[in-house]
Amino acid sequence: MSESLVSGSSLAGTGAAPRWRLALAIVVLGAAIGGFYAGAAPHTPVRCDPHYVTLIRFISLVKTSLAAGIVAGLAWRLGSAVNWGAAILYLLAAGSMAAGPGLIWHMQHIAAGALCFHGGIALGVATMLIVDRAGWVAVLSARLQRARRSI
């Protein structure tokens, strides 16, 4: 799978970057709204301490801000050369991260929201490490060589 992500048709120079960024915006907005309204579905009210509700909602807001920063990075990444498989995986990761905080906010699907959020981060990082492996392997090799010279 990694060879098809790394090699293959690149989107550079095709004018596809604005389309991928638009797709990213649509996926993130749709997932965030869907996650928020899925958590707001009719349900039995959760009976717990009001301080716990405040804490969980604050965590949801923190996760929202983290997702916004990561999605901004993905939008930047989709602006450069990337192939179709990687772009789709980046979109899945962004959508999953955007849905998580909405699920957590209503206190009904905390575990599912955390799984969506952290799974999206893991998918995005794994895709980045596979697709952009030349960059991070070079950085790690250079640091290892400097560490060996300093010993």
Image: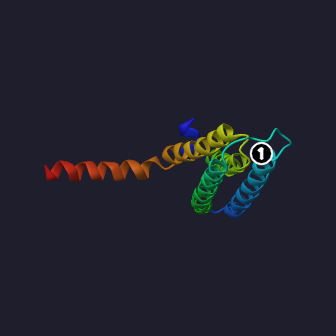
Q: Residue at x 57, y 57 (%)?
A: 66
Residue at 74% x, 41% y is: 46
Residue type, mark 1 in image:
Gly
Q: Position of residue 48 (x, y in %)?
A: 68, 42
Observer able to see residue 12: no
Residue 44 as seen in the image, left or right of residue 151: right
Determine the residue located farthest toward the front in the rendered image: 49
Look at 43% across and 49% down and name the residue there. Answer: 134
How packed is label 1: few (under 14 Cα within 10 Å), some, or many (20 or more)?
many
Q: List the single residue furthest toward the top.
A: 1
Furthest residue in direction right, as rendered: 42
Q: Nearer the viewer, residue 118 or 103?
A: 103
Secondary structure category for the residue under label 1: helix
Q: In the visual, does 116 lie left or right of 42?
A: left
Question: Which residue is found at the position 81% from the left and 47% from the top?
Answer: 40
Residue 116 at least partly seen: yes
Residue 139, x across and y down, in percent? 35, 53
Which residue in the structure is indicated by mark 1?
39
Q: Does 35 sit left or right of 13 as displayed?
A: right
Image coloring type: rainbow
Q: How many marks?
A: 1
**Whole-percent x, y for residue 124 in the image:** 57, 47
Q: Choose between 8 and 51: the one closer to the eye.
A: 51
Quadrant location of the N terminus in the rendered image: top right
Outermost left residue: 151
Spot occupied by residue 95 in the image (x, y as percentages of width and height): 69, 49
